[in-house]
Each structure stands twice: as structure tokens, then as C-alpha cells.
Image: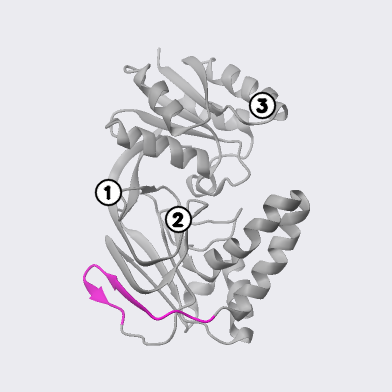
């Protein structure tokens, strides 16, 4: 029988306990499964070390949880050896949407039990950190930085304040001067850049198709560069992102490659939902078919 460990967040609230129990029960219908709760990278490393012969690791959570597990498995040298499953229980389940996983947690668990797999690429940045879903620099990351104190201080109400700040800052933040190179070829446009997005998954922020043509198994990183400058065009850009149509705009360059290098003004980056400090340089490369995942 297939052996699995199910990884759940030890810091999650008790409201998630029933869902976790239901997932474990569904996994147990066709596999030998053990639930492990973790709260840190050290916990993940220990869990993997204690299960050296497991067939699959199933993530019970969202994009952040998946990122943490994939990073831990890669650090342990086991990413290519153990199949990864995903049961979307997080607030952001964007990569699950790219994979076509069902929203229902029991239904997603049964996808794992069914045992169908697919080779999935992994993006790795210049710090040797994985990007499972997507990363972006520019107005989105800057707005997230401005909203973060409000979200932390006010809880749920802070998200509304954060959303308002995001919209305002997105209209007023000046574009950056960047040199963007994809597979050794530098983009020739000279206008200021308001956003560079790269990734393996199509969606960010709970369903916005920022990289609408991304295929996590094609061996390529999708890249979207927006040169939109005026407030009016930025508003139109934002609406087109929600519809997944921005890649057709004349002020957006959309392409694919295996190595991306961005240099210029120091900017923050949001990578798999985590905000980094500002840096004048970012780079990413693809590792084709670096992991295998359970899929519908």
C-alpha cells in the first residue's frame, strides 16, 4: 500500500481540525497515512528525516504551505524522489487552481488516492529559494508592503484598509528603470516598468490570472512586464489582469524563457506570497520536471 505523510500547519485554528480529520480519513481509504503537524522549517526537516521511505508527502494548506514543503524537500535532496500531493486548505490556493484541483478538501484528497501523477517544473531564484507558483516585483509588492502594518494591526478590518492602500499606491508609485534579460536577450523597451511577474502558476492573490498562459510542465518560466504609466492606463491594466487579458495590451510584454535576470532600481518582491526586502537585482531559472505531483 502507498505510504503517505500528511503535513498540516500546527498553528492553524481549531476550526481547521475537522477538515484535517476528514482529509486524513479520505487519504486512509487507499493509503497508509500519518498526520504530521509542523510550524517551522526545522519541523519540516525533522518530519522528512523521520520518514525516509515514504512514497508521498501531502500538503494540507495553501500556496505558502506548499512552498515551505517543496523547499524542505529540495533542501533534503528528496524532491525528485517523493510524490507531492496538495489538498487546498489555505487562504490562497492559487497553484491548486492551476493544477485543476477541486475546491473541496475531501475531493482533493481522493485525487491523491487515485494516484495519477504529473511532472512539475520548479522555479529557483538567485538565493536558491524555490518559487512554486509566482513572484512579482513592482507596484503589487510595493503596495503589499504599504498595507502590511494595517493588516497586522487591524486583523480582518485591516485587509479592507490594505486593499484601499494597494489601489492608491498602485496609481501613484512611479515606474522603475530596469534592465530585463530573458535567456540572454535584453528587452529593448525603455519606458519605466511598473511590474515584472514571473512564474509557473497562472494565478495570484486568490484567483487573479497574472500569468494566464503559464503551464507548470512546459519547462519554461512565463514572464509578464508592464510598462503602463498613466493612472488611467493603470486602472485599465488592473481590470485587464482580473480578466486575464493584460498580456494582449500594447504596454505589456509577455514571453517565456528558462533564465530571467532583472537589474536596476531597488524593488521589493512578492514570492509565493512572501514579501522580501528591496533589491536592485533578481534572477530566476527553471528546473524542468523537478518534482512529481498528484493531479486530476
Other-residue count near label 2 (Cα within 10 Å), few / some / many at <14 / 14–19 / ≥20: many
Other-residue count near label 1 (Cα within 10 Å), few / some / many at <14 / 14–19 / ≥20: some
Q: Is residue 15 left or right of residue 93?
A: right
Q: In which quarter of the image is residue 134?
A: bottom left
Query: x, y (%) of residue 150?
Result: 70, 57
- Residue underneath mark 1: 287
Query: x, y (%) of residue 92?
Result: 59, 47
- Residue underneath mark 3: 19
Q: What stretch is highlighted in magenta?
A: 174-187
Q: Which residue is drawn at 59% across and 39% down?
A: 102
Q: Is residue 142 left or right of residue 53?
A: right
Q: Quadrant of residue 140?
A: bottom right
Task: Identify the secondary structure beneath mark 3.
Answer: helix
- Residue underneath mark 2: 134
Q: In which quarter of the image is residue 19?
A: top right
The single residue placed furthest to the left in the displayed view is 184
Q: From this viewpoint, is residue 115 visible? A: no
How many numbered marks have been drawn onto this rendered protein structure? 3
Q: Earlier in the sequence, mark 2 or mark 3?
A: 3
The residues bearing labels 2 and 3 have C-alpha atoms spaced at a distance of 27 Å
The single residue placed furthest to the right in the displayed view is 157
Q: Which residue is drawn at 59% across and 84% down?
A: 233
Q: Residue at x 29, y 30 (%)?
A: 78
Q: Which of marks 2 and 1 is nearer the N terminus?
A: 2
- Please tell me whether residue 181 belongs to the stretch shown in magenta: yes
Task: Identify the secondary structure beneath mark 1.
Answer: strand
Amino acid at each position: 500500500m502507498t505510504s503517505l505523510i500528511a503535513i498540516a500547519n500546527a498553528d492553524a485554528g481549531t476550526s481547521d481540525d475537522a477538515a484535517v480529520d476528514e482529509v486524513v480519513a479520505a487519504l486512509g481509504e487507499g493509503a497508509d497515512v500519518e498526520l504530521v503537524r509542523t510550524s517551522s522549517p526545522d519541523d519540516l526537516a525533522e518530519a522528512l528525516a523521520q520518514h525516509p521511505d515514504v512514497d508521498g508527502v501531502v500538503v494540507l494548506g495553501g500556496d505558502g504551505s506548499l512552498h515551505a514543503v517543496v523547499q524542505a524537500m529540495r533542501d533534503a535532496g528528496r524532491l525528485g524522489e517523493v510524490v507531492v500531493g496538495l489538498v487546498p486548505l489555505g487562504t490562497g490556493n492559487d497553484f491548486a487552481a492551476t493544477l485543476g484541483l477541486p475546491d473541496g478538501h475531501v475531493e482533493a484528497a481522493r485525487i491523491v488516492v487515485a494516484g495519477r501523477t504529473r511532472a512539475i517544473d520548479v522555479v529557483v531564484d538567485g538565493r536558491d529559494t524555490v518559487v512554486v507558483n509566482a513572484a512579482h516585483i513592482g507596484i503589487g509588492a510595493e503596495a503589499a508592503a504599504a498595507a502590511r502594518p494595517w493588516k497586522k494591526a487591524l486583523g480582518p478590518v485591516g485587509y479592507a484598509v490594505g486593499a484601499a492602500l494597494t489601489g492608491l499606491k498602485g496609481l501613484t508609485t512611479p515606474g522603475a528603470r530596469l534592465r530585463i534579460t530573458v535567456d540572454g536577450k535584453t528587452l529593448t523597451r525603455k519606458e519605466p516598468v511598473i511590474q515584472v511577474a514571473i512564474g509557473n502558476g497562472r494565478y495570484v492573490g486568490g484567483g487573479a490570472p497574472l500569468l494566464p498562459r503559464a503551464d507548470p510542465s512546459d519547462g519554461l518560466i512565463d514572464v509578464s512586464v508592464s510598462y503602463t504609466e498613466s493612472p488611467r492606463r493603470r486602472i485599465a491594466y488592473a481590470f485587464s489582469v482580473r480578466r486575464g487579458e493584460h498580456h494582449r495590451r500594447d504596454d505589456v510584454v509577455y514571453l517565456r524563457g528558462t533564465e530571467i535576470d532583472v537589474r536596476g532600481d531597488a524593488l521589493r518582491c512578492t514570492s509565493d506570497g512572501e514579501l522580501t526586502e528591496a533589491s536592485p537585482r533578481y534572477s530566476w531559472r527553471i528546473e524542468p520536471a523537478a518534482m512529481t505531483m498528484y493531479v486530476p
